[in-house]
């Protein structure tokens, strides 16, 4: 399964220019910015607080805005079906992604606990769930659409899978550099553990559902279940934890994503998923290599 090319009229130089991956990357940027501003305006209009029902509603609306923006961009700029959001596989792939995200974060916390840096000191009620769900749903949709759906996919069409993997992972890691408590270790950790794993999940399915489910479940479990910081944001979870010891083990103020256990576990899974993607023929060569191969096949 290879990504679908834009529907470019063969006799149109204008559409050939528009459908070049670099042009599409440039055109997609204001779309992303517009989605952010629309989401912010709606969030303000609702008077939403991050830890209340209005905040959860705002997160769901924000996810819908990014979904709608991406759908419109693909449908009317790339002029093709939105295969990345095919509906039939959505329930299964979302469920698989959620299961992987919950399992991975649980393994990471288990390793941190085994090293003596995490233990349960109490519990909280369901009042913590709106915020926990919000930090799963909105980043799960918005970041996967922007990074995997646009940046990775378009870089891959242009530069090939390996370059797209490196560039999108670097962008994803750098994007977390400005979060509270971020360090260079956190940025590198995010790039390797999440940047590789989420791109590999997209490559295997060529859809965004599983990556969204995994990303959302990871965030939800990290903060909403285990009560650890999520990318530097302090979240109250159902578990009231004690977290202490070396920042290399716990991730410090940034949270488990910046920890060595998370880097080891998630990067290992990401590499394994890349191997699966490669064996299934999901890697593609750079555009100029594909053109040369296509010309050779026609001779």
Image: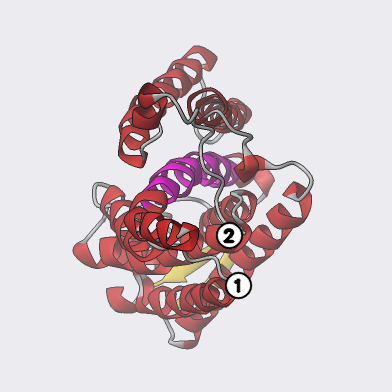
- Characterize the local packing of mark 1: few (<14), some (14-19) or many (20 or more) Cα atoms within 10 angstroms: few
x 57%, y 32%: residue: 67
Look at the image and name its color scheme.
Answer: secondary structure
- Mark with earlier residue (1, 2): 2
Q: Is residue 249 left or right of residue 278?
A: left
Mark 2, secondary structure of its residue: helix
Q: Quadrant of the C terminus?
A: bottom left
| Residue 167 belongs to magenta span | no
Measuring from the top left, give residue 210's x and y in whole percent. Answer: 63, 56
Between residues 140 and 232, which one lies in front from this camera angle? 140
Task: Identify residue for label 1.
Answer: 280
Q: Is residue 116 left or right of residue 133?
A: left
Between residues 203 and 238, which one lies in front from this camera angle? 203
Is 28 placed above or below 199 here?
A: above
Measuring from the top left, give residue 173's x and y in whole percent. Answer: 31, 57
- Characterize the local packing of mark 2: few (<14), some (14-19) or many (20 or more) Cα atoms within 10 angstroms: many
| Residue 144 belongs to magenta span | yes
Disc nearest the viewer among 1 and 2: 1
Can the viewer see residue 288 in this picture?
yes
Mark 1, secondary structure of its residue: loop
- Quadrant of the image occupied by residue 102: bottom right
Is 109 placed above or below 94 here?
A: below
Q: Is residue 99 left or right of residue 139?
A: right
Measuring from the top left, give residue 289's x and y in whole percent. Answer: 35, 61
Start-end of magenta stretch: 131-155
Instruction: Kindly give the residue lying farthest to the left in the view shown.
Output: 184
Task: Identify residue for label 2.
Answer: 221
């Amino acid at each position: 399964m290879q990504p679908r090319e834009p529907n470019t009229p063969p006799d149109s130089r204008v559409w050939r220019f528009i459908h070049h991956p670099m042009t599409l990357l440039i055109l997609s940027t204001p779309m992303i910015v517009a989605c952010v501003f629309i989401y912010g305006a709606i969030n303000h209009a609702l008077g939403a607080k991050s830890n209340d029902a209005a905040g959860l509603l705002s997160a769901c609306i924000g996810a819908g805005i990014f979904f709608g923006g991406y759908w419109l961009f693909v449908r009317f700029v790339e002029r093709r079906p939105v295969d990345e959001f095919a509906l039939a596989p959505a329930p299964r792939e979302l469920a698989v992604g959620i299961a992987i995200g919950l399992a991975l974060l649980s393994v990471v916390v288990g390793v941190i606990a085994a090293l003596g840096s995490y233990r349960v000191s109490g519990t909280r009620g369901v009042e913590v769930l709106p915020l926990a769900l919000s930090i799963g749903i909105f980043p799960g949709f918005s970041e996967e659409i922007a990074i995997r759906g646009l940046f990775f996919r378009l870089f891959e069409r242009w530069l090939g899978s390996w370059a797209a993997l490196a560039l999108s992972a670097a962008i994803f890691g750098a994007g977390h550099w400005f979060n509270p408590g971020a360090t260079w270790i956190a940025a590198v950790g995010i790039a390797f553990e999440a940047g590789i794993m989420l791109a590999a999940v997209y490559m295997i399915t060529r859809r965004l559902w599983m990556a969204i489910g995994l990303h959302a479940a990871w965030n939800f479990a990290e903060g909403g279940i285990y009560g650890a910081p999520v990318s530097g944001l302090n979240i109250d979870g159902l578990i009231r934890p004690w977290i202490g010891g070396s920042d290399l083990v716990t991730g410090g103020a940034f949270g488990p994503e910046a920890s060595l256990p998370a880097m080891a576990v998630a990067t290992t899974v990401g590499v394994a998923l890349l191997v699966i993607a490669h064996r299934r023929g999901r890697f593609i060569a750079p555009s100029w290599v594909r053109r040369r191969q296509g010309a050779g096949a026609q001779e």
